Image: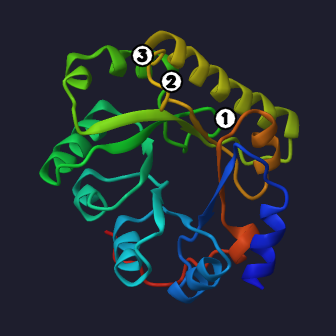
Amino acid sequence: MIQESLKSVLSTITAPTRLIAVSKTKPVEDLWEAYNAGQRLFGENKALEMRDKHEVLPKDIEWHFIGHLQTNKIKYIIPYVALIHSIDSLNLLSAVEKEAAKHDRVVDCLLQFHIATEETKFGLDLAEAQQLLLSEEYKSMTHIRIVGVMGMATNTPDTDLIRKEFHTLHDYQQQLKKQYFQDKPEFKEISMGMSGDYQIAMEEGSTLVRVGSAIFGARNYNIPVNDK
């Protein structure tokens, strides 16, 4: 079932977009099924859950942290995380820098923007992102690398609104590229699009789509997750 769903999703994705299989709340057995079908990029939103899965799954998996990251949980993912999608403050970025230095790693990160109408979603606005990038603290960091942007669209059936929000995020990425990353070819990622809207996101320039329920089925929020 998972392998068939994964194959179906992959058939709709075209380069340069890459698929992150969002496996949060799913048991290791489900991840194995996707892994055996060839999937290597997995996304989690709980640090301890990701740590536990990393410990028992193959080490060629590329782990993406896509949730709201608490500073006291950074240490559980820094040794192996491929990309942190959810940097929404200078304080969080500084904490990642500090932990990455302990492991002598340079950790790739995305700046998360608030593009949705819902107030509950996290993220920077453009002015806050510019202030972060101009700060002396950011300029002194040597163990993080900002490689793009991330955002979540409003949870709505209004596809015109969704498209507008994704277009806004693409514009932010282009503005930041021109202003701060012109000589940084790695600044190319736009992480946007989930199960219900990833095809619109691709049309608007997404390079990373985060798809969970379309692959694994509905999430199970009743499993115990020790991430408090």
> Which residue does the image show at 78% across and 62% down from the upper left?
10
Q: Is residue 63 above or below residue 159?
A: below
- Farthest-out residue, bottom: 29
Quadrant of the frame with the N terminus: bottom right
- Label annotation for residue 71: none
Q: Is residue 225 above or below residue 10?
A: below
Q: Quadrant of residue 217?
A: bottom right
Mark 1, secondary structure of its residue: loop
| Amino acid on which the number 2 mark rests in the picture | Asp
| Amino acid on which the number 3 mark rests in the picture | Gln
Marks 2 and 3 sit apart, C-alpha to C-alpha, by: 9 Å
Residue 212: percent from the left, percent from the top? 66, 66
**Which residue in the structure is indicated by mark 3?**
130
Mark 3, secondary structure of its residue: helix
Residue 192: percent from the left, percent from the top? 65, 43
- Label annotation for residue 117: 1
**Which residue in the structure is indicated by mark 2?**
125
Q: Is residue 137 above or below residue 147?
A: above
| Amino acid on which the number 1 mark rests in the picture | Thr
Is the residue marked by circle 1 packed among few (<14), some (14-19), or many (20+) residues within 10 Å? some
